[in-house]
Image (tube, rainbow, N blue to C red):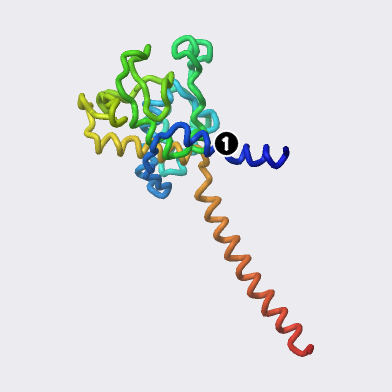
Amino acid sequence: MRKFLFILFCFIPAICMAATNVHLDKAPVDLEDKDSLQRGARNFINYCLNCHSANYMRYSQLSEIGLSEEVIKKNLLFTQDKVGETMAIAMNKQDAAAWFGAPPPNLSVTARSRGADWIYSYLRSFYKDSSRDMGWNNLVFSNAAMPHILWELQGEQLLDEKTGHLKLVKAGIMTPKEYDQFVADLTNYMVYMSEPHQQKRKQIGYFVIAFLVLLLILTINLKREYWKNIK
């Protein structure tokens, strides 16, 4: 029974993914691209932080992607007084639940729980649906409570029931290519936000591996020197 339960739990994620049967586009994530991360931070604060919090992220950490404290205060610090404070929102959970049906989730680590491909595909997969209270639905996350807050940028899409594909029927402010880049920058930033020290951790890991390889070489040579006269 224990072996059966272990195998079952191992296959649950795969079964769930198969059940959704939704293709996820590859997100062009590049944490070395500071310009993309800066644009993504701007997009996130201007469009997402109105409803969603990011309580595990501090404004001061934006300095690690090349933004000065002066730029953060002048252009990005709208809801807090100090750069060192977290990205919290004024909306309380009771109001959020009444307006949207459920409180919007904290997005601090969404990129780690959902994955970059999921975020990138989700934000590009909204379509008009008259049966929904908000008038929108999503191909990746069916019947999501979140409305399409970026519709003015992307435009309006409709779902072709026969093919299961989305078709742009009303253009937005941005061209499809510009909107895809907008979402790519936002996704890139959310990946960074979910683990701000990821790049630094990887760099430390490279140094550790290099040290261990050097130590291995020294150990092998020491062993040979110690045993060379022993037969």
* Residue of label 1: 12
Q: Position of residue 173 (x, y in %)?
A: 22, 27
Q: Is 227 in front, or is 214?
A: 227
**29 to the left or right of 212:** left
- The type of residue carrying mark 1 is Ile
Q: Position of residue 189 (x, y in %)?
A: 42, 38
Q: Residue at left 27%, top 27%?
A: 160
The relative height of residue 220 versus residue 26 in the rendered view (above or below) is below
Q: Is 86 in front, or is 151?
A: 151
- Residue 74 visible in the picture: no
Looking at the rendering, which quadrant does residue 161 occupy?
Answer: top left
Q: Residue at left 24%, top 35%?
A: 176
Q: Quadrant of the C terminus?
A: bottom right
Q: How many marks?
A: 1
Q: Residue at left 53%, top 28%?
A: 55
Q: Position of residue 23 (x, y in %)?
A: 38, 37
Q: Position of residue 107 (x, y in %)?
A: 49, 29
Secondary structure type for disc 1: helix
